[in-house]
Amino acid sequence: MKHLFVSSMQVLGMLLLGLTVAPARADMPQILDKGAIRIGTQMDNPPFGYIGPDGKPAGFDVELGQMIAKSLGVKAELEQIIGANRIPYLLTNKIDLVISAMGATPERAVQVMFTTPYAALYIGVYGPKSAAVTGPDSLGSLKIAATKGTTQDLTLTQLAPHANIIRFEDDTTSNTAYLSGQTDLWATLNTIAIDLSRKNPQRETELKFKLRNSPAHMAVRQGDFQLLRWLDTYIFFIKGNGELNRLHKTWLGEPMGDIPVL
């Protein structure tokens, strides 16, 4: 009987310990109660996120985050992140929400929950006109710059497991590696490639082959269902009132078009 009592107390102690170490929730009541939402956004990913000439954050994702905070009636607290730490920052409760042109994959969905898409994008492999590349099978030993842990890195690795992928910690370093000639090719989002090509016409960068469509999603921590449902509702709402189309025209230079629904 004494042994049973001790065992019961041990189980109770383990349960209490589990309660004390569980990560703090970031669901809707907590966000509204503290009057702020912590939003992780990349600042090396124009036109979605970057530092403007005035030294302040700007871009599609930045404005969308500010709109969300305003609609919730709370303050937007922007946290600068990079591709590799987007999910870890969520899991360790450093942020409540990722708005960072993030592509959804089954692997990522094990760790986080994705909203319905808010922007239609695709990823591809880019390079100079002189590079004779038409698909994953023609990469050979050419060096390809990619940002570690991004959708383009994961997809290219799957399609071409023996490709010579040079992985960098953030988009800025990856972009610079390609521009400086450290790599022959570059795997990235179409919007980043368009921006770089416009600013560096001498590189004569073009799309070599498309990896996959990669619509942009927001991400929240597993279990934050109230926040997830509200964000899905908000995307639906701004699709209907024209605000999402305005964001596309302002930051991407083209109408919204058809965006898939998750």
Image (cartoon, grey):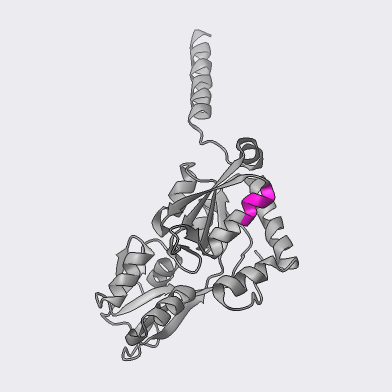
Q: Main secondary structure of the magenta part?
A: helix
Q: Position of residue 244 (x, y in %)?
A: 66, 67
Q: Position of residue 47 (x, y in %)?
A: 49, 69
Query: Horizontal placement of 141 versus 62: left or right?
Result: left
Q: Which residues are magenta?
A: 67-72
**111 or 13: nearer the eye?**
111
**220 or 79: nearer the eye?**
79
Residue 31 falls in image quadrant = top right
- Relative to 125, is 50 above or below? above
| Residue at the image position 59 percent from the left and 69 percent from the top | 119
**129 or 2: nearer the eye?**
129
Q: Is residue 260 visible?
A: no
Residue 70 in magenta stretch: yes
Q: Residue furthest top?
A: 2
Residue 203 falls in image quadrant = bottom left
Q: Position of residue 183 (x, y in %)?
A: 27, 76
**163 or 240: nearer the eye?**
240
Q: Is residue 62 visible?
A: yes
| Residue at the image position 33 percent from the left and 86 percent from the top | 202
Considering the image in quadrants, where does the C terminus appear? bottom right
Residue 143 in magenta stretch: no
Number of marks in picture: 0
Q: Position of residue 12 (x, y in %)?
A: 53, 20
